[in-house]
Image: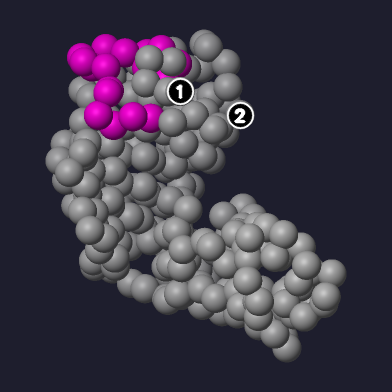
Amino acid sequence: MNHLFFTHHHFDHDVDYPCFLLCRWDQGAGKEKPLVVRGPHLTERVTRRILDAEQGAFGHDWVARVNAPLSQRVHTQRGGVLPRRPPSVDVRDIGPGVVFSGKDWQVTAAPAEHVQPWLDSLAYRIDTPDGSIVITGDTQPCNSIVELARDADVLVCMCCDDEQDCPECELPGRTGTIGAARMAQQAGARTLVLTHVGPQLANNLALENARGAIRHIYDGRVVLAEELQLLDVAQLPAGSEVGMRQAWRQTGR
């Protein structure tokens, strides 16, 4: 992975960041590509607090690995060359708009509504020749995400629970099944992927109830995401009447 985009800085979205940064640098042995990190306000600060040589939480670690003869030997055994470079990250705080462009892909950000004013939040749209994907991050239903997801192939939307059975889903800052369905329908997104789900959606009866409620609002495909499974945008099943688990079995690998 050479590009990382943060939606916001709650710990459940950040906690693996130090491990990712340091393992990528250490195991890469100087052969890894430059890492690009973008995110809302605090992204630069969080990165400094991890890597800064004097004040960073893991500054002592990488300083030792750069300088200790034992660590230098391990580095060269992995194919690295001396002198060893410290970890380096191209990190920037960003706001709404086009935030990154690659050779054949582009990332656009839009505001999400989660726990402002304490933390800023962003949703992202990735446009490629193979399709477009929007990732909401944690948010309540809002017009900025509907516009970001206009005619997208896939809308990956946080879904805390089924709003039919979970009054807490109506609290500000969160999206449930009904809110996700409405945003997907208003945007014209062709597939809705529900993620960041709560325990109420963990059994088959709850899934069927949720699917039925969503179908009254949204006429695209629906997938309930599961950990470590991939969705191939170019090979989505035809037709809209596909159950959540069934759709994932057909498209995941």
Residue at the image point whose x is 25% and y is 29% from the top? 234
Within the image, what quadrant is residue 227 found in? top right
Comparing 228 with 170, the one in front is 228
Mark 1 against mark 2, which lies toward the viewer?
1
Crowd around label 2: few <14 · some 14–19 · many ≥20 (10 Å): few
Crowd around label 1: few <14 · some 14–19 · many ≥20 (10 Å): few
**Is residue 3 a member of the stretch shown in magenta?**
no
Precedes in sequence: disc 1 or disc 2? 2
Q: What element carries label 2?
A: helix
Within the image, what quadrant is residue 81 found in? bottom right
Residue at the image point whose x is 46% and y is 36% from the top? 195
Comparing 146 with 228, the one in front is 228
Above/below status of 248 relative to 109: above
Q: Which amino acid is tagged 1? A: Arg
Within the image, what quadrant is residue 22 found in? bottom right
Q: Distance between the residues labelled 1 and 2?
A: 23 Å
Comparing 41 with 126, the one in front is 126
Residue at the image point whose x is 78% and y is 67% from the top? 73
- Tell me, yes or no, if residue 179 can be seen here: no
Residue 192 drawn at (x, y percent): 31, 32
Give the residue at mark 2: 199
Above/below status of 160 relative to 205: below
Residue 168 drawn at (x, y percent): 53, 40
Above/below status of 59 relative to 39: below
Residue 153 drawn at (x, y percent): 22, 36
Q: In the rendered structure, which segment of residues is drawn in magenta?
A: 231-248
Q: Residue 253 carries which label?
A: 1
